[in-house]
Image (cartoon, rainbow, N blue to C red):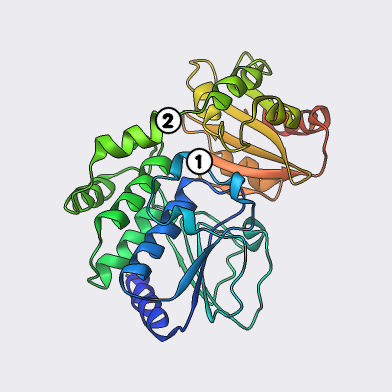
Amino acid sequence: MQNNTLFTDLYKEIQKAHYILVVTHKNPDADTLSSALSLSNYFYENKIKHKVFNVGQENELPRRLNFLNKFDKITNVLPKFFDLIIFLDCADQYRVGYEFDSNIKKIVIDHHQSNNFFGDINIVDDAKGSTAELLYSFYEVNNLTISKSNAECLYVGIYDDTIAFTTSRTDQETFRILGKLMDSKIQVSYISDKLLKRDSLARFRLRPKIMNTLELYSDGKFAMIHLESKWLKETGALISECDDIVDDVLSLGIVKIVAYLRLIDGQMRVSLRSKDNINVSNLAKHFNGGGHKYAAGLTLDTQKFSIAKETLLKVILDYI
């Protein structure tokens, strides 16, 4: 397989590098952070100098992931020197939120569909359910040991991006990898408790505000919800704390597509989710966005929810 050769090349680049920058995308989800922390744990255990970089502020990182080893070492401050950059779950440079020196070697590991991959080496497999699952192959191809801390990171990335192993990309290979991760003595019950049973009071206060914005169209097939920035101040919640609310709305029997709108850094970001074989990555591409068949994202050039919703309705109702 081509990626096996690329994983070998990646290992050679890691061995040659003096200082590695591991980069996650802005507004990070569990897959990008868990994959980055997986590499960070491996690098730390093997005395490889590196930093994990995210362009956002510390309080913008998903708090539910703070049990993962090395989470507290993620930084938005660039080191003075690095000669290799590894991007995790970043299908294009826009997702990164920072433009790096073009002379520095770049490697992208990702599982999205995109025409904008920007690495000197692009390791891509859009059949995988998560970047974490793809990254596992890097360790396997190069016969590298996966520690318990590393395995926890990979498990979380796979679990979260496959929506608890329920997406169509979850297959026999996914469960084979999970079985191998269990060999590292991870405790699934411990991970589940940390991921699912540590909600903040702020999150509980924010969720009903978002749910009260629910609007249904086309006999309920299309649903929209939004988050107003003032609610974050009112509740003390982080903007990332309710990202999974789209899946809750999608659980309604009549709903086929969900759009979740919120203003991030002055831009209207829209998360799309779908079921019943509806491909929302095609919808996202219409707006120069991207993603998977059942989960995609895009940005609209407006700061008004009313305009954003009208723009989405014109396209999505025709698509349905």
Q: Tell me if 19 is positioned left or right of 127 in this view.
A: right
Which residue: 36% across, 72% down? 7
Q: Is residue 70 visible?
A: yes
The three-letter code of the residue at mark 2 reads Arg
Mark 2 touches mark 1? (CB < 8 Å): yes
Q: Tell me if 157 is positioned left or right of 191 in this view.
A: right
Q: Is residue 217 visible?
A: no
- Callout 1 secondary element: helix
Q: Which mark is residue 178?
A: none
Which residue: 52% across, 46% down? 29
Q: Which mark is residue 198?
A: 2
When asked about the image quadrant of residue 48, the answer is: bottom left
Between the residue at mark 2 and the residue at mark 1, the CA separation in whole angstroms equals 9 Å
Q: Which x, y percent locates residue 68?
A: 38, 49
Q: Quadrant of the C terminus?
A: top right
Residue behind mark 1: 63
Which residue: 68% across, 64% down? 98
Q: Tell me if 12 is positioned left or right of 313 in this view.
A: left
Depth check, front residue: 257 or 18 = 18
Q: Which x, y percent locates residue 192?
A: 32, 35
How crowded pointer 1 is (Cα within 10 Å; few <14, some 14-19, many 20+) is rated as some
How crowded pointer 2 is (Cα within 10 Å; few <14, some 14-19, many 20+) is rated as few
Location of residue 34 with respect to 202 vertically, above or below: below
Q: Which x, y percent locates residue 257?
A: 57, 28
Point out the residue furthest to the bottom here.
16
Q: Tell me if 75 is positioned left or right of 269 in this view.
A: left
The three-letter code of the residue at mark 1 reads Arg
- Callout 2 secondary element: loop
Q: Quadrant of the N terminus?
A: bottom left
Depth check, front residue: 124 or 14 = 14
Location of residue 122 with respect to 130 vertically, above or below: below
